[in-house]
Amino acid sequence: MNADKNVHHTDFLIIGSGIAGLSFALKVAEYFKDSSVTIITKDNKKESNTSYAQGGIATVWNKSVDSFKQHIEDTLIAGGGLCDESVVNLVIEEAPDRLQELIDWGVQFDKKEDGSYALGREGGHTQHRILHHKDMTGAEIKRALIHQIEQKKNVQFLDFHFAIDLITEHQAKQQQTQRKEEITCFGAYVLDLKNNQVQTFSSKVTLLATGGNGQVYNTTTNPSIATGDGLAIAYRAKAEISEVEFIQFHPTALYNPGEYPAFLISEAVRGEGAILRNNRGERFMKQYDPREELASRDIVARAIDTELKKSGAPHVYLDCTHLDYERFTAHFPNITEKCLGLGIDLRKDYIPVSPAQHYSCGGVNVNKKGKTSVKNLYACGEVTRSGLHGANRLASNSLLEGIVFADRAFKNLRKRFHKIEAPVRIPSWNDSGVVKNMEQILITHDRHEVKTIMSNYVGIVRSNERLLRAERKLRVLYEDNKRLYDHSELSLGLCELRNLITTAYLITQFSKKRTENCGGFFNADLVDL
Ligand code: FAD
Ligand code: SIN
């Protein structure tokens, strides 16, 4: 192996090409014109949770009817008392400026005939405040951001490059004077998936923007890239993480057995007046919350779960038959087309829906500057726990969190980047002792097993017994995977499996430690009888 060919030096290493990674990349590339910026992403450039975002981005846009105070209150209520109020305030107050930046970068949000922006509404919001591009907001954002990135001469954008681990360990030897507990990040080891070679990327600054972890569950709206890599990577680097037990289940994924990931029926559809009905055709949300279909997601998802357990049916229905069809198809062309393709005519048929894993509210701890507990390691977007979401994220606050924290990390680096020294003496990847030709089918089996364990035991409703079972089974999987990982040739499947097991284990452990039900976390044994 030619060591030099596989060692790269860059000023900024950005792991992930969703809204968080790309908006950060644009800002640092523009401001630090003489710097080198490298974005790596594990799949093609477009693939990310961001690309599938439907509903849009929440912001207070029309101040004659809406206010920061109301958006803040809605966010705090959804978060079940666990949001960091100062973070909520700053995100919501900075939101209009960040939205204007997206518009300036070319993102087209839908407008009304009078030229003003068409604002949607979703569960938990007391106002129409969601800027959107039909029901394909994320794809439009990605289009515009990728176009902007491609104009930047100092950005190298590498697709099919998978971050395996952060480089941190050698620093203790290198800097004996450093406090023992202070860990510094010097870049990452990356698997180039096109030729299956491990490359070393040393960097002054590393940004983790790897998104979510929905693939630990059987049913999720998240694409296959969402394997919890960033969380597991940060955990192995000893970064602080928290609140990963708060998994958000979206109430209305299309019930279409065999389709992975689950196709989302946006909450904005309920914002337009769609009604939930059980298998007897009865509207049921009134029994669960006075806000009915527009209660926050945790409440609607649990209500559906209860209905399903009572009836034994695999899904409930979303009824759009009373809505103006022309208006509906203009706002939701993607959903209309999907339903039509399955023979569902929204003018007369109900849509079968059931809850699916959708979002990870907790993650790698970041402060208000987007800094993790590891020096020179920043993080933003879904991989983080910033304090914005608490126990349950308010709809359409996620894309927002990504752009606000990318901006905050950038602004912090404007002040301190010049002080950061280039890393030296980075150890190269050691792949001695590996056995080739390991049976790939073992990875497939184990990946299946993780999903089954999490769906059966660490889902919408958990219990002490379920969590214990999950923990025990995951421990066995961990041991098996460790043996494989230590002795086999690296592959995407093997690395992802390692991260899925770690992520599942962390969700289970944090669930065991939580002693009160709150927001998206519900343990049946904690309910007062
Ligand atoms: P992502 O967009 O997920 O990007 C992560 C990137 O990291 C990807 O490019 C991925 O390939 C890369 N990556 C991951 N691991 C590695 C690795 N090991 N090495 C290299 N690269 C890696 N939120 C809203 O606010 N409004 C909405 O309307 C909305 N709708 C949604 C609809 C759907 C179907 C889904 C799934 C989510 C939706 N969300 C919505 C949530 C929102 O889309 C995500 O939380 C947000 O896009 C996350 O952005 P991100 O930049 O943090 O991560
Ligand atoms: C949706 O459109 O329902 C998803 C919005 C979100 O996850 O914020």
Image (cartoon, rainbow, N blue to C red):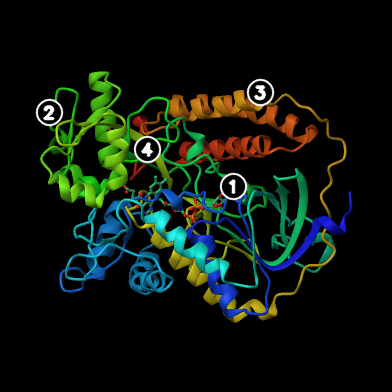
Label whose residue precedes the other's in the sequence (3 or 1) = 1
Check disc 3 and give the amino acid type: Ile
The CA distance from mark 4 to mark 2 is 24 Å
Q: Which mark is residue 263?
A: 4
Is the residue marked 1 within 8 Å of ligand 1, measured from its CB? yes
Is the C-beta of the residue carrying label 2 under 8 Å from the nearest atom of ligand 2? no
Q: Identify residue for label 3.
A: 441
Q: Is residue 221 above or below residue 332?
A: above
**Quadrant assignment, res 88:** bottom left
Residue at the disc numbered 1: 43
- Closest to the observer, 471 or 114: 114
Q: What is the x, y in percent for residue 357?
A: 41, 38
Label 1, secondary structure: give it. Answer: loop
Going 31% across and 51% down the picture, which residue do you hit?
Answer: 135
Left or right side of 490 for 383: left
Front-lying residue, 107 or 479: 107
Mark positioned earlier in the residue sequence (2 or 3): 2
The kind of residue tagged 1 is Asp
Tally the numbered discs: 4
Q: Which residue is under mark 2? A: 282
Query: Residue shown at 83%/54% (left/top)?
Result: 428
Element type where label 4 sits in the image: loop
Residue 445, how many percent across, how many down? 60, 23
Q: Is residue 178 above or below residue 275?
A: below
Pair 3/1: label in front: 1
Within 10 Å of disc 4 (Cα), the crowding (few <14, some 14-19, many 20+) is many
Residues under labels 1 and 2: Cα distance? 43 Å
**Would you say 483 lies left or right of 368 here?**
right
Q: Give the amino acid type for the residue marked by disc 2 in the picture.
A: Glu
Say what secondary structure mark 2 lies in.
Answer: loop
* Disc nearest the viewer among 4 and 2: 4
